[in-house]
Amino acid sequence: MTIDVVVRELTPGDAEQFHAFAAHPLVLPTVDAAQVPSVEDVRTFVTQLAAQPDSPRKERAIVLDGEVVGSIGLTIEGSEGELGYVVHPDHWGRGVATQAAMLMVRQGFAELGLTRIYATVSTENPASVRVLEKAGFRQVDAKTWAVTR
């Protein structure tokens, strides 16, 4: 079964769906969050991103069947970008993160002119390692995976 993942700009209207995965108890340990974000925290975050188009952080919504089921982004540092992503647990294991990662890598190289994209992942998260492998990344050290143009 093929799924059709879309990666698009986040909007303040996405705050409630974004909150559904950002505050999920299975997701919180995988992200750097000091506390569970409120819907208003998420709305503020998304609004601030939209107000800073030249920001080095390019965060996008992962959309499946019209629903925001995750987020993916690149933090730009010169000609390199660090990839980060999170998907609602209801959609784990379905290829959503892999398709979104492939789309962001394509965008990073084609639209942003990057020459290298990397991600840091814990070896205790084999599912995320598989996402990166399927998206063309190769392990460069104990916790870093990268793909080059």
Image (cartoon, rainbow, N blue to C red):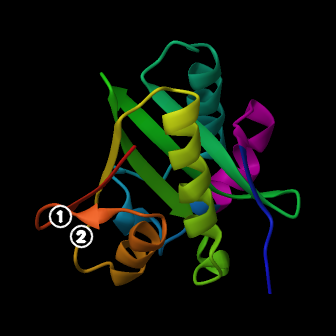
Membership of 14 in magenta stretch: yes
**Left or right position of 84 against 39:** left
Count of number-bearing discs: 2
SS class, disc 1: loop
**Picture coordinates of residue 30, whole percent (x, y):** 37, 65
Q: Which residue is mark 1?
A: 143
**Picture coordinates of residue 93, whole percent (x, y):** 58, 84
Magenta span covers which residues? 8-20
Tell me the kind of residue under disc 2. Ser
Specify few, some or many for label 2: CA neighbours under 10 Å numbering under 14, 14-19, or 20 or more: few
Quadrant in the picture for residue 130: bottom left
**Residue at horizontal 79%, vertical 74%?**
3
SS class, disc 2: loop
**Picture coordinates of residue 147, whole percent (x, y):** 35, 53
Specify few, some or many for label 1: CA neighbours under 10 Å numbering under 14, 14-19, or 20 or more: few
**Picture coordinates of residue 124, whole percent (x, y):** 25, 80
Quadrant in the picture for residue 21: bottom right
Q: Quadrant of the C terminus?
A: top left
Membership of 36 in magenta stretch: no
Tell me the kind of residue under disc 1. Lys
Quadrant in the picture for residue 142: bottom left
Give how far apart the Cα atoms at labels 1 and 2 are.
Answer: 6 Å
Q: Is residue 94 visible?
A: yes
Q: Is residue 23 visible?
A: no
Secondary structure character of the magenta stretch overall: helix
Q: Is disc 1 in contact with disc 2, using a CB cutoff of under 8 Å? A: yes
Q: Which residue is mark 2?
A: 122
Residue situated furthest right in the rendering: 66
**Left or right position of 94 against 52:** right
Up the image or down, 113 lies above or below 107; here it is: above
**Residue at horizontal 62%, vertical 76%?**
95
